[in-house]
Amino acid sequence: MQPNRMATALLAIAGALGTHNVSAQSGGVSRTDLVHHSLAANGYETLQVRVDFDEHAFAPAHMHPGEEIAHVLSGTIEYRLGGQAPVTLQTGQSLFIPAGVAHSARNVGSGKASELATYVVRTGEPLVTLVH
C-alpha cells in the first residue's frame, strides 16, 4: 500500500471509529499504525495496528479485504462477527476474523482496553468498508 493510500485508509476507519486521524483520540477509539509491509505472496500486504478503546467505546461494523487477527493487549473486548453470538476476549486472548466478514468491537470492561490488529489484505483495495 502506498503511503498516501495507507493514510487515507487509516483515516477512513479512524473516522468511522470516531477519530479524526490515526494518532489522535476522539469518540473513545484511537489507532496507531505500527507496521506496514508488502508480502512475498504477490498481491498481498500486512498491516499491524494498535487500537485503544476508552471505557465503553465502540468500533462499528466494518469488513476488510483479507484476514484479521485481533489480540487483546489489555482489558475486555466483545467482538460480533456476522450473525454469530458475541465473543468476549480478555487480555492475552486472540480472535481470527475471516476476510469479508462484517464485525464490530466494544470495550465491555471497566477502564481502557487495547488490541493489536494484524491484517493480511489484498494490495490496492481499501483497508476498511463500513457496513450499514
Image (spheres, rainbow, N blue to C red):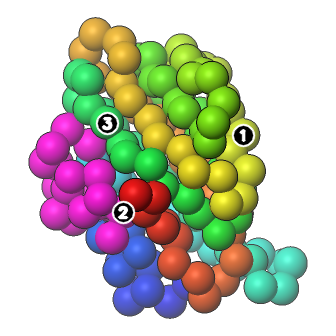
x 83%, y 85%: residue: 42
Q: Position of residue 3 (x, y in %)?
A: 43, 86
Mark 1 surroundings within 10 Å by alpha-carbon count, few (fewer than 14), some (14 through 19), many (20 or more): few
Q: Which residues are magenta?
A: 12-29
Q: Is residue 34 visible to the viewer in this orientation of the structure? A: no
Q: Position of residue 117 (x, y in %)?
A: 55, 47
Q: Position of residue 2 (x, y in %)?
A: 50, 89
Amino acid type shown at disc 3: Phe
Q: Is residue 80 visible to the viewer in this orientation of the structure? A: yes
Of residues 112 and 66, which is closer to you in this image?
A: 66
Regarding mark 1 in the picture, which secondary structure is present there? Answer: strand
| Residue named by callout 3 | 58
The CA distance from mark 2 to mark 3 is: 13 Å
Vertical relation: 41 (above or below) 16: below
| Residue named by callout 1 | 96
- Is residue 60 on the magenta stretch? no
* Disc with the residue nearer the chain's start (2 vs 3): 2
